[in-house]
Image (cartoon, coloured by chain):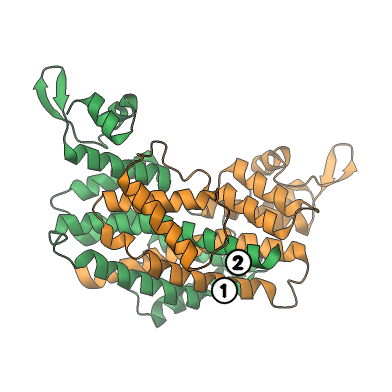
Chain colours: A green, B orange
Amino acid sequence: MRIAELSRVSGVPVPTIKYYLRESLLPPGELTSPNQASYGELHVRRLRLVRALIDLAGVPVAQVKEILAGLDSETMSLHDQIGRAHRAIISRRQLTSAPQDSTTEAAAAQVEALIKSRDWKVEADAPALTTLTETLATMRSLGQDHLANLLDAYADAVEKFTALEVAAVTSGPDHTTPGQIAESVIIGTILGETLISSLRLLSQESTSAHRWT
Amino acid sequence: MRIAELSRVSGVPVPTIKYYLRESLLPPGELTSPNQASYGELHVRRLRLVRALIDLAGVPVAQVKEILAGLDSETMSLHDQIGRAHRAIISRRQLTSAPQDSTTEAAAAQVEALIKSRDWKVEADAPALTTLTETLATMRSLGQDHLANLLDAYADAVEKFTALEVAAVTSGPDHTTPGQIAESVIIGTILGETLISSLRLLSQESTSAHRWT
């Protein structure tokens, strides 16, 4: 199909599609003449993924590019593709002025104990470790120890999510190639977060409506 | 304390503090002379909250302002304060070009069935409903039905989070006034999401390391 039809099918305006092509978020179409390219199902699908990452998950364009480059790599291991997606979505979640005080040290110790008790195998420089530590420290310094103390209960639930997700993406006849598993894992990681986040808000709104109205 | 000391204690640069004062993210200090103001513990605490919302939770400044105005309101009900925070953090998570197709209709039906089966009391125009529906539709249109089918399992876990959080913020001698409960709920909602998100990434990284390296 031509770019006008790709726009109609996907609902994405032509100038936006052209921008994605320039930024390599979308692979080039097949040239049918010097000035005309043809696009296929692969482009429709990729456009859906790009829109979801940007609009629903709030991932900045530069990071989307990183994630897609990982997905399209023929040589990168699945673990490295996942690591790249992780770094792309969390690298910006860090205090720009983090106080190095006793609260932060205590939070770091709490995180270390958690990792050890659950035998989690994570790199010492994983950005999520910093985000987790700073979040716990902030909760405590704002007098919300009772929230920071829920860490273990949160981790229990999160481990269940991960087990379900791994089972979902690795089973079934449609997900047997490493490339398909990688795409599934990336979508599960990033859109799964949007899913959990919106479910949480609905559950909280309902609880609040029952309790405080 | 003067602004220079507030900067030292909080780690936030003076120009940033001045910007927050101009934007009303921080209440004015007490004037001690026509050109000098004095700041206290309340300012240190508010600065921590602002930094956490912006840096860790990624909430844009305009939305932080909305949330704080809700928190500082003397007349707004707790339910409305929570609603305001919800809208501030999720309003931007929406497809700018959503296709109205059968996949979206099926996703809307799945969400409606979920709300009904769990007896959730949510407003028909809650932004999280749109985000949830669009996320499910995107998963399905990308061939990830197995992920979209986890919706009920996710909702189970999320209901547990909410119950734990409500118990945490409403119990304990420190959280008896409505204002304190409101602050606790807002912090729990927003920083709780950052906590879950970073725990998920760590759990996934570990699983991936065990499985795919």
Three-letter code, disc 2: Thr
Cβ–Cβ under 8 Å for marks 1 and 2 = yes
Q: Is residue B188 above or below residue B69?
A: below
| Residue hosting label 2 | A207
Q: Nearer the viewer, residue A46 or A113?
A: A46
The disc placed on residue B163 is 1
- Work out whether residue A95 can be spotted: no
Three-letter code, disc 1: Ala
- Could you tell me which residue is drawn at 41 percent across and 41 percent down? B95
Query: Closer to the camera: disc 1 or disc 2?
Result: 2
* Position of residue B40 measured from the top left corner of the image (x, y, whole percent): 79, 56
Q: Residue furthest left?
A: A32
- Could you tell me which residue is drawn at 43 percent across and 77 percent down? A156
Q: Is residue A2 left or right of residue A201?
A: left
Q: Is residue B70 left or right of residue A197?
A: right
The disc placed on residue A91 is none
Chain containing the residue with disc 2: A
* Position of residue B170 measured from the top left corner of the image (x, y, whole percent): 68, 73
Q: In what element is the residue under mark 2?
A: helix
* Position of residue A9 measured from the top left corner of the image (x, y, whole percent): 27, 34
Chain containing the residue with disc 1: B
